[in-house]
Image (cartoon, rainbow, N blue to C red):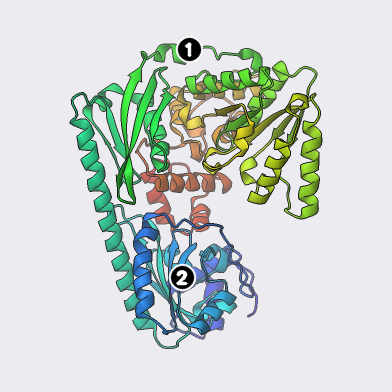
Amino acid sequence: MPRHQPGNSLRVARELYLEATNDPSARPLVVASWQRSIEYKVKSGSLDAPYLDNPNLDSPLARAALPILNRLHEQLADDPVSTMITDRNGVVLSRKVSHDGLTTHLNRVRLAPGHVFAERYVGTNGIGTALASGRPVVIAGSQHYVEELREFHCAAVPILHPTRSTLLGAFNLTTIRQGSDGMLMAFARSVAAQIEAEIAAITSRRERALFQDYMEACSSVRPGPVLALNGDGVMMNEQLRAAVTGPDHYALLDHAREIADDRRWEGTRSIALPSGRVAELRVSRCRRGDSDAGAILRVRLIGRSQRGLAVSATPARPVLGLAGSSPQWLRSVADSEAAFLTGTWLQLLGEAGVGKRTLVEALHRAHGAGRRLEMAEAPLSDAPAVTERWLHDIGELLAMPSRVLVLRDVHVLGDQLRQRLRNLLTHLDRTATGQLVMTSQPSMVSTEDQLDQFCGATVEVPPLRHRYGDIEHLARFFLRKYRPSGESTFSPDALALLQQCPWPENVRQFESVIRGLARRSSGRMIHVEDLPPECRVSSHKVLTTIEALERDAILRGLMARNSNVQRTAQDLGISRATMYRKMRRYGIVPSSLA
């Protein structure tokens, strides 16, 4: 196929499509997909479908679809047709095929569970194009963008959530049989409708079960504040609504969502709220057989609101040079400092960008006299020679009592290397070693992980979205850092927007924003219109986990594309109109964006 320079990508896409397919009808939906494939710089001469380990088979879509695919597999025995279900990102979750010849063809192009068939990787194809366009599609033969896929005929139908109409994934039929496009599409639509109906039934059963347990909790002799939630909704009684308001309300919901997402967690947990109060959460799961319908949280509030003090308080432990005075942050600093002072091995848990490394460096500056701070990360390769050298270096560093070794991001270590690291730590003489600090992301740490048994203390560093009271402290801290001679400050409206932003990349992102403002803004007062797009989130709508991920993806895209809505929409595989609709939905203010 001749190569064209992508000037007008739509014209180029149409020309390439006509050359490849000799199809004068040039369906707009397929041509638009070819246009996106060109803009993604997909190579038509080679197939690159990335592989994702352990695709999520515990999603509502997978639970609803897999029994249906199993029944279809029996009905289609020996028929050269493959049935597949994918998630919203184009990851193949399950594939059923009973025809050996077709299996060979599919394996050759990696159209198999775990591989990603989004348009950005493999160009126009049934799965990716249905997900990108949000419409049922048939991609037949030469309409595929990548040449290796042109022997296939595919019909794919997007699968939507029955009540929220959000995209969950797609159902796909693939065959190498010619002239069966109409039959394929009719069959695919029918199966997709069955899957959506089953999702609706499961959702209804879950909601009824959660509502039943919620009402029982609310109707007890002394119910107190009660909260019930799952990925689809939130219920709270009037006692909770009246007792927890403002920033405390949003902080409590953030914590509750994270607790509800962990289906194995039950018991009591205490969290510090922005006002200075503590919320004691007694968590029980709503279960029916093998199904988990959500969590019921009985809430007890301890202490009095101290909002006035929290706003004006000077951050504790100024000797460490750390900004922030929220109870969650101060507790993390104090617990980490106590472990550091006694030489206790320490595990720091926290999302990317929350400041784990900054905290360790501050502790070392204040209390590490005579000891050298060393940073180590996971090896870049799992080649035996590389891992052997890495383990040797870790052992050498820990063998020196004058060292503080920070082993960063241990959650990325593979199982085999983790086992060898455990063996190394087990055989160390703990009376003559340096101090070890391990950092991890909490969502990546398995409950069966054994590395934490070597640490005498585990501290969780809170994400910035749980530190509402620290936004003003951090803003002033970073303004002084990047504009030391200036007197800049934020208008009340601008500061309020900063406090509402979800900050998916935490303090790292916040510092980057303030650094940019310090360089760009020439006036003493920074106003709302000076803020970049990732700060323009004006909605406190309670989001599901999927919605929060979608919102954060949009924010990151706008950051990477310098506020360009059109290019961000193309990167995400959605139309510009859909992009603006989602921005309004998530409170991302579209004014002044490209």
Of the pair 217 and 129, the residue shown nearer to us: 217
Q: Amino acid at mark 2?
A: Arg
Of the pair 247 and 202, the residue shown nearer to us: 202
Q: Is residue 56 above or below residue 302?
A: below
Disc 2 target residue: 95
Return the x and y of residue 51 as percentages of the image width and height. Answer: 58, 62
Q: Is residue 11 left or right of residue 76?
A: right
Q: Residues within 10 Å of mark 2 (few under 14, many from 20)?
A: many
Q: Secondary structure at mark 1?
A: helix
Disc 1 target residue: 312
Return the x and y of residue 310 as percentages of the image width and height. Answer: 45, 15
Q: Nearer the viewer, mark 1 or mark 2?
A: 2
Q: Is residue 121 above or below residue 324?
A: below
In the rendered picture of this protein, how many numbered marks are placed on residues? Answer: 2
Name the residue rendered at 44%, 88% in the picture.
178
Q: Is residue 562 left or right of residue 540?
A: right
Q: Amino acid at mark 1?
A: Ser
Q: Secondary structure at mark 2?
A: strand
Of the pair 223 and 542, the residue shown nearer to us: 223
Residue 100 visible: yes
Quarter of the view holding residue 182: bottom left
Return the x and y of residue 114 as percentages of the image width and height. Answer: 53, 63
Q: Is residue 228 above or below residue 80?
A: above
Alpha carbons under labels 1 and 2: distance apart: 59 Å
